[in-house]
Image (spheres, grey):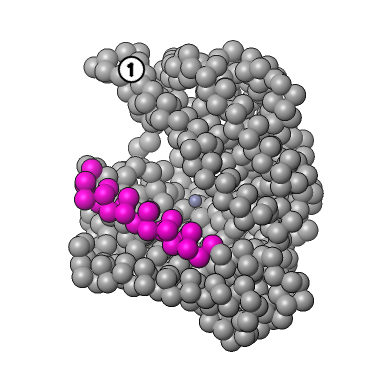
Amino acid sequence: MSQSPKWDLGRLYAPDSLELKQDMELIRRRRTEFAANRELLVNDKLTLERFAALVRELESLRILDSQISGFAELSFSDNTSDEKAQAFLGVTRQASAELENELLFFELWWQKLDPALADEYRASLPEFDYFLTQIRALLEHSLAEGEERVINLKNANGRQAIITLYDSITNRYVFDSSFIPGSDGQPIGREELMVQVRSHQPRLREKAYQELYRVFSDDGPALGQIYQALVRDWRQENVRLRHYGSPISVRHKFNDLPQETVDSLLRVCQGKGRQVFGRYFQKKAQALGMSKLRRYDLYAPLSEEKRQWTFAEAMDEVTKCFGDFDPQLAQLAQNIVSQNHLDAQIRQGKASGAFCASLAPKMTPWVLMTFKGQTQDVFTLAHELGHAAHSQLAKDQNLFQFHACLPLAETASTFGELLLAKRLLANADPADREALTFHLLDDAYATVGRQAFFALFEITAHEMIEEGASVSQICQSYWDNLVTQFGDSLALNEEFRWEWVTIPHIFHTPFYVYAYSFGQLLVYSLWRVYEREGPDLAQRLMKLLARGGSAPPLTILAEAGLGPLDDDFWLGGFEVIDALMSGTGLSG
Ligand SMILES: [Zn+2]
C-alpha cells in the first residue's frame, strides 16, 4: 500500500443500477403503505404490536433512504464536477424531503398522544425509549399542525433563503493575492488566502487577515443586517411563539443538556481558560522571538515541516496508537481500509475537507480526506477513523439512537488525535516535540477558547439586537468580547471587530459553537482520567461509545463513571492543556 487508497462506492450501488432504481421505487411504495395507517392513529385503534411494527417500519424506511441519499452524497463528493452525480443528488434530496413530509403525521400524533397511553406504548418498545421520549419532550414547544406547516413553508423562502443568501454572497468573495510571493496576482478564494495565516513570514500572516477583513467589512453593514434579521426571527419563533426561556435554551434542548452544565463550561473558559491561553500566547511570542504576540500570529508555525509521510506509514502509526489503547479500536480503524471505505487520494474534482459518513447501524462508515503526506494529514486520519470506530461500536443501536448527540459526537475523534499526539511526542526529537506541542495548543485554543467566546458573543448579540442594536454597536460588542478574551496577552488590531461576520456557524445555527468547546474540553478531561486509571478508563470509554445517542449525554457519561460536569470537571481538562504547555506532554 504505497499509494493512498480510493474507496469503492460500488459496494453500495453500481451507478444507474437496477437495484438502486428498485430501492427508490420500494421507498415510494412503502411510504404510501405507511401513510395508510393514519386512520388507525386518529381513532386510537392501534394495538401495541401494531405500534411496534410501525416504529420499526419507520426505522427501516429511514435506513433505506439513508443508504440511497448516502450513495448520492458520496458519489457527488467523489467527483463534484460530475453532472450526473449532481443531478442525482438533487433527485434524492427531493425524495428524502417527500418521505419526511409523508411520515410527519406519525411523530405529530405521537407527540400529542395522551400521557398514560404513551407510557403504555413506550414500555412495549424499550429499545426505542430515548427516541420516543425525545419527540414528546418537544411537545411543550410545538405549535398547532397548521402553524407548524406555515412556519415550514415560510422558512423555505424566509430564514433558509436568508442563510443561503449569506452563503452565496460570502462564497463569491475573492481576495487579492499580489502580496503573496510568487503569486501571479490572480484573485484567490478564502481557503487559499487563509493558508497564509499559517505562514512563517509575519508580514504574510498580517496581510492575509487584513485582506480577509477588508473584503468582509466592505459588505459588513449588509451582512450585519442579515444577522440582525436571523437573530430577530430566532427570538420571535422560539422565545415568543414556542416559549423557550431564552435564545440559547433552544440549543440546550436539542443537545439535551441542562443549562447549568453549559453555564459551568462557559464560566470555566472565561476564568481558567483565559488565564491558561493568555500564558500560552506569551510563551508562543517567546518561542517566535517576538516581544508580544499579535492576533495575526496566533496560528504561526514554529518550524518548517520536514517529515513527509506515506499513507502506509500514517495508517501504521494510527493503528498502533489506537491498538495501545484498545486492540478493538485498531481493528475498527483497519476495517475502513480493508473494506475499501476510505478515500484518501489526491484527485481533481474531489470534495475538499474531510468527513466520516455513517449511513446506518451495521453499515461500515465511509471516510473521505485528502492525504498530502503532512503530519496534519495523519491527525486528520486519526480523527476520521476515530469517528468511524465510534459508529461501528454503536452498531447495535437503532437508527434513531445511533448517532451520538452533538456534545458527544467528537469524543472518539478527538480522543484518537490525542492518542496519536502522545505516540508522536514520545518518539519525536526535542525540536519536533516543541513544534508539535505548539500545534496541539493552537488547536486547543481554536476549539476550546475561541468557540466559547463566540458563544458568549452570541448571547450578548441576541440580547442587544432585541434592544435594537445597530451593526456598529454589534461590532463594538464583538471588540469588547475580544478585549475581555485576550486582555494584555496579545496585540489586537482594529479590523478584528468584523470577525463575527465571517463565522458561518453563528448565522446558520445559533449557539452551535459551544458544542466544540464542550467536546474538546470533555476529551481533555477524559484524558486526565485516563492518565490516572489507564485500561479501566479504556473499557469504560468503549462502552460509552457503544451507547451512540441512545440516552441523554450526561446519562451516558455518568454510566461511564464520568461527571458531574461541574467546574472541577472542566478544570481537569485545562490541567491537560497546562501540562502540555509546561512541556510534560501527554502521559497516560
Ligand atoms: Zn469530527
Which residue corresponds to the image point at 55% horizontal and 54% vertical from the top-left? 410
Write down the quadrant of residue 342 in the picture. Answer: bottom left
Q: Which residues are magenta?
A: 81-104
Q: Quadrant of residue 44?
A: bottom right
| Residue drawn where x is 21% and y is 62% of the image | 15
Instruction: State left or right for residue 215 relative to residue 240.
Output: left
Crowding at dot 1, Cα within 10 Å, few <14 / some 14-19 / many 20+, comes out as many
Against 124, is 507 above or below?
A: above
Dividing the picture into quadrants, the one containing residue 537 is bottom right
Does the magenta stretch mainly form a helix, a strand or a loop? helix
**Does residue 189 lie above or below 325 as drawn?**
above
So how many labels did they put on this image? 1
User: Measured along the vertical axis of the image, is residue 26 above or below residue 244?
Assistant: below
Helix, strand or loop for disc 1: loop
Image location (x, y in percent) of residue 579: 66, 44
Instruction: Give residue 255's position: percent from left, percent from top.
Output: 65, 54
**The N terminus lies in which quarter of the figure?**
bottom left
Residue 31 position, x and y percent, is 43, 70
**Residue 150 belongs to magenta span:** no
User: Label 1: which residue?
Assistant: 177
Residue 205 in the figure: left or right of residue 75: right
Viewer can see residue 81: yes
User: Is 90 one of the magenta-colored residues?
Assistant: yes
